[in-house]
Amino acid sequence: MSSIKVRYEKGVFRPLQKTEAIEEGAMGEVRIQQKNGRPSVRASEFFGLWKDRKDIKDGLSYVQRLRSIFDQLRISSF
């Protein structure tokens, strides 16, 4: 699997780098990264994972709390 950066313009995803290694007709998946640098929670394959849990009332707040903890751990490891 490989990845390339693309820009969406006028209804078409245009590559921002050379694509010689990609065969004509190859298919792939596009994940959009938000302007703040983090992908949308809704774009995650884990979206809805906690819908049946009684201890998590608000999934978005739960994810934001997990991200905050992760960011603190990542910063403190440097």
Image (tube, helix red, strand yellow):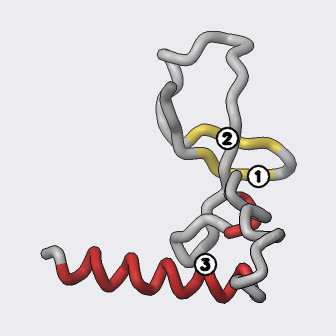
Image marks 3 and 1: residues in contact by CB distance under 8 Å? no
| Residue at 19% in and 82% down | 76
- Disc 3, SS: helix
The local crowd at label 3, few if under 14, some if 14 to 19, many if 20 or more residues have their Cα within 10 Å, is few
Determine the residue located farthest toward the front in the rendered image: 54
Foreground tag (2 vs 3): 3
What x and y, as percent, mark residue 48? Answer: 79, 64
The local secondary structure at tag 2 comes to strand
Amino acid type, label 3: Val
Amino acid type of the residue that numbered disc 1 sits on in the rendered structure: Glu
Task: Tell me the tag on residue 46.
Answer: none
Query: At 84% across and 51% down in the image, what residue appears?
Result: 10
Q: Distance between the residues labelled 3 and 1?
A: 31 Å
In this rendering, position of residue 52 left or right of residue 66: right
Q: Distance between the residues labelled 2 and 1?
A: 7 Å
Looking at the image, is mark 2 or mark 1 earlier in the sequence? 1
Q: Is residue 9 left or right of residue 15?
A: right
**Residue to which mark 2 is pinned:** 14
Looking at marks 3 and 1 on the same chain, the residue that comes earlier in the sequence is marked by: 1
Q: Are marks 2 and 1 in contact (CB under 8 Å)?
A: yes
Q: Tell me the residue that label 1 is attached to.
A: 9
How far apart marks 2 and 3 lie (CA) works out to 32 Å
Label 1 neighbourhood size at 10 Å, few (<14), some (14-19), many (20+)?
A: few
Q: How would you rate the neighbour count of disc 2 (Cα within 10 Å): few for under 14, some for 14-19, many for 20 or more? A: few
The residue singled out by tag 3 in the image is 63
Q: Is residue 41 left or right of residue 71?
A: right
Q: Position of residue 41 (x, y in %)?
A: 68, 69
Instruction: Establish if 21 lies above or below 59.
Output: above
Q: Which amino acid does label 2 sit on?
A: Arg
